Image (cartoon, coloured by chain):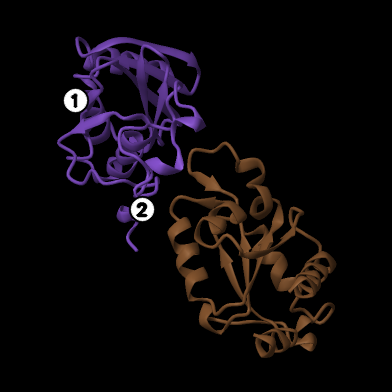
Chain colours: A purple, B brown
Amino acid sequence: MSKEVMKDLREKLKGKIIDIVQPRKKRIYIRVEPKKAPEVIEYLFFKYKCKFCTATGMDIREGIEIIYHLAREDKNMVINVKTLVPYPNLEIKSIGKKIPAFRWVEREINEMLGVTFIGHPDMRRLLLADSFPKGKYPLRKDFKHSDVNDEDYDYERSGL
Amino acid sequence: MDVLKKAFKKSIWVFHLSTAGCNNCDIEVLELLTPRYDVERFGIKLVGSPRHADALLVCGAVNAHAKPRLLEVYRQTPKPCLVVAFGSCGCSSGIFRDSYSIVGPVDKVLREEDPDVKIVYIPGCPPKPEAMIEGIVMGLGAI
């Protein structure tokens, strides 16, 4: 059954993806260019009956790698769409514009790793304190605790 | 001031404040109110407003979001007041010390506002109920 999915996806997504591999029986990795990522995910979500689980971002030095985790429940499969947003221009088109479930996780990736999601309707902070200094991204590899001192906090913005 | 000190020796009313703690300490505080320890027999009681409190019980390493709130609650508490830095995190930030959102343990944050603040440290993760009672009693002795 999983081979059918692979074959099907290879045909449908031809030209939009860099490569597609199946490391285990129930898992498929798809690697895409950041520009093509919204298109591929919207196809998987709307046309291919995939459900959105979550998205994760990680600093891998060359850029921020964002992985969108989608699940196809009737086939018992997890499909991971990986995309690498290279430094220094961390920009990617927002998927939350069309699919609201992506909005919160995009906000989190934005504040923690500094990726700008173009077209996101509500790009406020989600988890970090409002007083946390702007332009510092705590989950990047080059971030140190000593980068943020008490003077950098702007307590005027903390809502009290 | 002597009247205040005399009044302070009896029936300590405590305001319990959690500043980004993990809730472990907050749950242990409830154990003090169970029949086994029953601190209300000493007149120690949790109150709903810092304006009624003699002591602040602060649990958790203070993060950036909680810091202005902790200071505001401290300002509202009538002086003299006792601050209890509760648990390992309250005493020293504990394992969260190098986290990006932590701005310091309770004493560091409060000394910015008031250098003479009276702080009792009760370490432990969470502290034993006996330790909590002893801590409060020691704090009263110090005042």
Q: Quadrant of residue A134?
A: top left
Relative image position of residue B33 (x, y in whole percent): 74, 79
Q: Earlier in the sequence, mark 1 or mark 2?
A: 1
Residue at (31% x, 46% y) in the render = A125
In terms of secondary structure, where does tag 2 sit?
helix
Q: Chain of mark 2?
A: A
Q: Nearer the viewer, residue A151 or A110?
A: A151
**Distance from Cα at disc 1 to Cα at disc 2:** 41 Å
Q: Quadrant of the N terminus of chain A?
A: top left
Q: What residue lies at 45% left-to-right and 26% top-to-bottom?
A: A143
Q: To which residue does mark 1 refer?
A: A39
SS class of the residue under badge 1?
Answer: helix
Above/below status of B36 relative to A22: below
In the image, taking residue A60 as reference, residue B13 lies left or right, namely right
The answer to whether A81 appears left or right of A100 in the picture is right
Answer with left or right where residue B16 lies relative to residue B64.
Answer: right
Q: Position of residue B64 (x, y in %)?
A: 45, 50
In the image, A100 versus B44, the foreground residue is B44
Neighbours of disc 1 within 10 Å: few (<14), some (14-19), many (20+): some
Q: Amino acid at mark 2?
A: Tyr
Using the image, name the chain to which the residue with label 1 belongs. A
Q: Position of residue B109 (x, y in %)?
A: 54, 54
Drawn side of residue A62 relative to residue B29, left or right: left
Residue B126 picture location, percent across and down: 74, 57
In this figure, which residue is indicated by the disc labeled 2?
A155
Q: Which of pointers 1 and 2 indicates the residue nearer the eye?
A: 2
Q: Amino acid at mark 1?
A: Glu
**Quadrant where the C terminus of chain A is found in the figure:** bottom left
Above or below A135: residue B55: below
